[in-house]
Amino acid sequence: MSDDIKPGEQLTLAQINKLRNQVRTAPASLGGNQAGGSDESWRLRTDGPTVSEYVAAGYKASNYPPKGYESRSSAEEIAEALKLEQEAPETDPLKMKVPELKEWLTGKGIDFDASAKKEDLQALVPKE
């Protein structure tokens, strides 16, 4: 595997962890304090949430860990949370696929033509 990371390339968890380790050791290898702080000021905080706590608080798993915090969850826990996020049903009727949109409209008691196109169905969604 090449160490070069190309613009727009998606990183693997192994590449991300390698980069994190490089960042953690970089200030020490540069020989001194970073501007405005002690030798420890550059370190990521370790008191952040786990991925399950983060998601339970209403944040997306794809944004975990929060900026400035080290992950407290295993790679498996993060992968599972990401999988659940991707599989979550759409809740915005304007972004739903036709079958889900028809089901949503039916659930709201809104009548529609069974052969209606997506744009026509979306027009029936009440403005909120």
Image: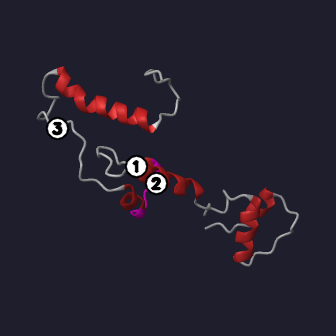
Q: Nearest the camera: 59 or 15?
A: 15
Q: Secondary structure at mark 1?
A: loop
Disc sitting over residue 122 in the figure: none
Inspect the image, locate mark 1, and give the three-letter code of the amino acid beneath it.
Tyr
Disc 1 target residue: 64
Disc sitting over residue 41 in the figure: 3
Is 13 above or below relative to 50?
A: above
- Taking 24 as reference, is 62 left or right? right
Residue depicted at x 24% and y 53%: 47
Residue depicted at x 48% and y 23%: 1
- Find out whether the residues at labels 2 and 3 contact each other: C-beta distance under 8 Å: no
Find out whether residue 118 is within the magenta segment. no
Q: Cα distance, mark 1 to mark 2?
A: 7 Å
Inspect the image, locate mark 3, and give the three-letter code of the amino acid beneath it.
Ser
Q: Give the image location of residue 115, x and y in percent.
A: 88, 63
Identify the magenta region: 56-62
Q: Give the image location of residue 14, x and y in percent.
A: 42, 35
Q: Can you tell which quarter of the image residue 89 is in? A: bottom right
- Find out whether the residues at labels 1 and 2 contact each other: C-beta distance under 8 Å: yes
- Taking 7 as reference, is 121 left or right? right
Mark 3 nearby-residue class (10 Å; few <14, some 14–19, many ≥20): few
Q: Nearest the camera: 39 or 19?
A: 19
Residue depicted at x 50% and y 51%: 82
Residue depicted at x 29% and y 46%: 69
Q: Secondary structure at mark 2?
A: loop
